Image (cartoon, grey):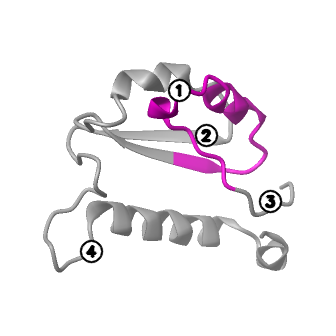
Amino acid sequence: MPRCRRRSATFHPCSGSRDDGPRLATLRCPATVLLAEDDPMIPAQDLARLAPSSHLIVVRTRHGGHCGFVERIKAPSFADRFVVAQFDRRRRETPTGLAGSIG
């Protein structure tokens, strides 16, 4: 597994940038996009602008809006639980000797 450097790559269709989507084709580390089909700011149809990558997983949900899939004000949201589950999954899949070299 290649060493992953800390970098932020954003894809935001509202930014007007045509480079963000194709840049994802160069991913060398696993990445996940969580998108709600009812998001009023980032239309689900803009997913077509994402370049295919074997490192990119796109998770689409019917509902969730734009504000973190809030279900209750004083409780973890779906997005919170989703992110924790992704980290837990990666931790289980990463051989013990490699865990310290990622980051």
Are circles 3 and 4 on residues that touch, CB within 8 Å?
A: no
Label 4 is placed on what type of residue? Pro
- Residue drawn at point x = 25 percent, y = 36 percent: 40
Q: Which of the two discs, 3 and 2, labels the residue nearer the N terminus?
A: 3
Q: Depth check: 36 or 40 in front?
A: 40
The three-letter code of the residue at mark 2 reads Leu
Residue 55 lies left or right of residue 16; in this view the side is right
Dot 1: few (<14), some (14–19), or many (≥20) neighbours within 10 Å?
few
Residue span colored magenta: 8-32
- Determine which residue is flagged by label 4: 76
| Residue 82, placed above or below residue 11 | below
Dot 4: what SS? loop
Q: Residue at x 81, y 79 (%)?
A: 100
Q: Nearer the viewer, residue 46 or 34?
A: 46
Residue that label 1 marks? 16
Distance of label 3 from label 1 (alpha carbons): 27 Å
The image quadrant where one finds the N terminus is: bottom right
Name the residue type under label 3: Cys
Which residue is at the far front?
16
Give the alpha-carbon distance from disc 3 to disc 2, as whole Å.
14 Å
Q: Position of residue 24 (x, y in %)?
A: 68, 35
Q: Name the residue under label 2.
A: 56
Q: Distance between the residues labelled 1 and 4?
A: 32 Å
User: Which residue in the structure is indicated by mark 3?
Assistant: 4
**Numbered badge on residue 48:** none
Q: Distance between the residues labelled 3 and 4?
A: 28 Å
Q: Residues within 10 Å of mark 2 (few under 14, many from 20)?
A: some
